[in-house]
Amino acid sequence: MALPAVVPRHIAIVMDGNGRWASKRFLPRIAGHQQGVEALKRIVRACAKHKIAVLTVFAFSSENWSRPAEEVSGLMELLAMALSKEVSQLKRDGVQLHFVGARETLSDRVKHGFDSAEASTAENNTLVLNVCFNYGGRWDMVQAAKRLVHAGLAINEDSLARSMALAHCPDPDLIIRTGGETRISNFLLWQAAYSELYFCDVLWPDFDEGELDIALQAYAS
Ligand code: FPP
């Protein structure tokens, strides 16, 4: 498929459907999340190829703590593995990593992994990859307002925008949600004000470069 003329600068994705992908195959849900990591790697490469500047993904929401303990610990384990296995390749590929979300309640191992992945990729400039982890759009607005209050600064649109967790990026031009649901689910509530929304039925582990191209064509038209 030919590349569309208008390519978004910033794409954000709600990667939904991992659990259903696994259930359809009589596999544990964590197998769907593992395939979700593979899909994410494919899409990072495709975004770099399409010269998209920023990719933001919703990896773990503030609400995901209410999932069964086994699934939550499986996701934490998957995250730790991805941090130890994938960061060196991402670094070589020029990806600048940011982890966005509340860190206080995360384990020291995860916090340390985030700090070291961010520090080791800080100079990269091919693609900015924001991984939203323990993130919620409402959390982001509250933390931004609290920071302003703490600093004794006025709260207005400009100051709030500068205090949001994604202040290092332009707002997303395109938000994709896979898995068939047509909701925003507390993702990028502030930043989505003018974003184009694209929903598809494909389950996240099946999302690939071809599916991304279809989304990009829809955005361009
Ligand atoms: C939603 O699918 C997906 C998640 C809650 C996790 C997304 C995480 C990844 C793709 C892996 C990358 C993340 C880490 C930790 C490195 P779902 O479980 O809600 O699927 P369902 O709607 O079919 O049940």
Image (cartoon, rainbow, N blue to C red):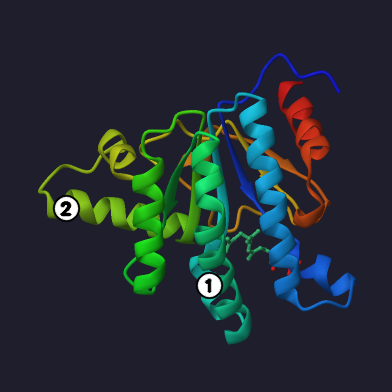
* Relative height, residue 150 to residue 24 (above, below): above
Mark 1 residue CB less than 8 A from any atom of ligand 1: yes
Mark closest to the chain's N terminus, 2 or 1: 1
136 sits left or right of 177 in the view: left
Name the residue tied to disc 2.
149
Under circle 1, the secondary element is: helix
* Relative height, residue 202 to residue 218 (above, below): below
Report the mark closest to the observer, 2 or 1: 1
Name the residue tied to disc 1.
76
Mark 2 residue CB less than 8 A from any atom of ligand 1: no
Q: Give the residue displayed 46% in from the left and 54% down from the top.
A: 137
Crowd band around label 1 with a 10 angstrom C-alpha radius: few (<14), some (14–19), many (20+): some
Crowd band around label 2 with a 10 angstrom C-alpha radius: few (<14), some (14–19), many (20+): few
Q: Nearer the viewer, residue 41 or 187?
A: 41
Residue at the farthest left position: 152
Q: Give the residue displayed 28% in from the left and 44% down from the top.
A: 163
* Relative height, residue 76 to residue 94 (above, below): below
